[in-house]
Image: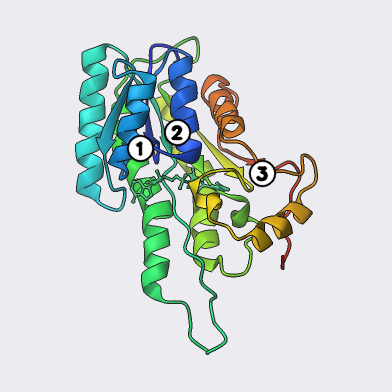
């Protein structure tokens, strides 16, 4: 799938990993529809990338109607610019730590569980689900007749969740597990599905970590012994879009880091 001349829908595109994807896609001649709740950062990014190439659409991925409005607007923009939809990158995500049972014998609250699963799992699936009919109806590209790419975001927590990450790990494990059946369902349409599972990357999500947690995580890192940069994530997304043989796979992007039990 060529990036140039195509429009990509990116949730969570106003910050961190999603924003790096929007920058990369625009730098390669693509268009980015940025769906996010953060209108201030989304608007600033559109100014940076140029309103001719990027569009901010307010969206809360926990609301089906909010996704519907944003996806309809993104599809209309793609028609208007003549740059058809090429894929979706559902990168909106949240973390909310909570022990499954704390010292006071309080089990984790379902409100917190629903919040994390609602954004990371339901929000991912709902956005993808609503973009797919547009991709499926598009013109096939190249010798393989490709119609689009879905690049989902899992996490190292899908494999080695740490203490307090039961809900987050459940959400990211589910995203990883959806990858193959989704790819199989979409075979007949020529739409591929790739999931990336990053370890710790610099972003707003990790900016608030305590120094103790940072130092602990660093000890678990092999090479390179540093958090990933959002541009390194975007570079793998680019490969996921462009390389037609990548399909139905979860790729770890972690410099061999394996999260330990305790920091
Ligand atoms: N940074 C890391 O270390 C890391 C590691 C593994 C996985 N991830 C995953 O990568 C994805 C991107 O995270 P990031 O690190 O860039 O974080 P970030 O906080 O920088 O960006 C997340 C974006 O999602 C948006 N968002 C949150 N809830 C939303 C909602 N309900 N609807 C629409 N937008 C919403 C936020 O406004 C923000 O712009 C997430 O799914 C996260 O779980 C991050």
Residue 250 picture location, percent across and down: 60, 41
Residue 260 picture location, percent across and down: 73, 62
Observer-nearest residue: 259 or 177? Answer: 259
Name the residue beneath numbered marker 1.
Answer: 41
Describe residue 214's horizontal placement relative to residue 68 as left or right: right
Q: In the rendered view, would you say 217 is above or below 23? A: below
Observer-nearest residue: 177 or 55? Answer: 55
**Marks 2 and 1, how far apart in space?**
10 Å
> Does the numbered disc 3 mark a residue whose Cβ is under 8 Å from ligand 1?
yes
Name the residue beneath numbered marker 2.
Answer: 19
When asked about the image quadrant of residue 86, the answer is top left
- Helix, strand or loop under label 2: helix
- Helix, strand or loop under label 3: loop
Q: In the rendered view, would you say 109 is above or below 104? A: above
Residue 248 picture location, percent across and down: 56, 37
Please tell me whether mark 1 or mark 3 is closer to you in this view. Answer: 1
Earlier sequence position, callout 2 versus callout 1: 2
**Can you see residue 149?**
no
**At x 58% / y 49%, what residue is drawn?**
155
> Does the numbered disc 2 mark a residue whose Cβ is under 8 Å from ligand 1?
yes
Q: Are marks 2 and 1 in contact (CB under 8 Å)?
A: yes
**Marks 1 and 3, how far apart in space?**
23 Å
Name the residue beneath numbered marker 3.
Answer: 227
> Does the numbered disc 1 mark a residue whose Cβ is under 8 Å from ligand 1?
yes
Q: Is the residue marked by circle 1 packed among few (<14), some (14-19), or many (20+) residues within 10 Å?
A: some
Q: Are marks 2 and 3 in contact (CB under 8 Å)?
A: no
């Amino acid at each position: 799938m060529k990036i140039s001349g195509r429009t990509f829908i990116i949730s969570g595109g106003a910050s961190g990993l999603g924003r790096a994807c929007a920058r990369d896609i625009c730098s390669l001649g693509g268009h980015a529809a940025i769906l996010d709740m953060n209108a201030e950062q989304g608007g600033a990014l559109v100014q940076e990338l140029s309103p001719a190439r990027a569009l901010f659409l307010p969206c809360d991925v926990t609301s089906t109607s909010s996704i519907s409005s944003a996806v309809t607007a993104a599809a209309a923009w793609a028609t208007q610019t003549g740059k058809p939809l090429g894929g979706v990158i559902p990168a909106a995500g949240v973390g909310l730590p909570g022990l499954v049972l704390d010292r006071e014998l309080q089990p984790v609250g379902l409100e917190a569980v629903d919040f994390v699963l609602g954004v990371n799992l339901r929000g991912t699936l709902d956005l993808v689900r609503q973009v797919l009919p547009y991709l499926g109806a598009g013109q096939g590209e190249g010798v393989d007749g490709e119609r689009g790419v879905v690049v989902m975001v899992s996490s190292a927590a899908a494999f080695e969740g740490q203490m307090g990450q039961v809900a987050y790990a459940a959400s990211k494990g589910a995203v990883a597990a959806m990858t193959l059946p989704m790819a199989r369902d979409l075979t007949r349409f020529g739409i591929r599905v790739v999931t990336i599972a990053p370890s710790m990357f610099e972003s707003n999500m990790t900016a608030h970590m305590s120094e103790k947690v940072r130092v602990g995580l660093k000890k678990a890192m092999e090479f390179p012994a540093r958090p990933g940069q959002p541009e390194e994530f975007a570079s793998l997304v680019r490969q996921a879009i462009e390389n037609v043989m990548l399909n139905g796979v979860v790729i770890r992007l972690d410099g061999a880091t394996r999260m330990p039990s305790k920091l």
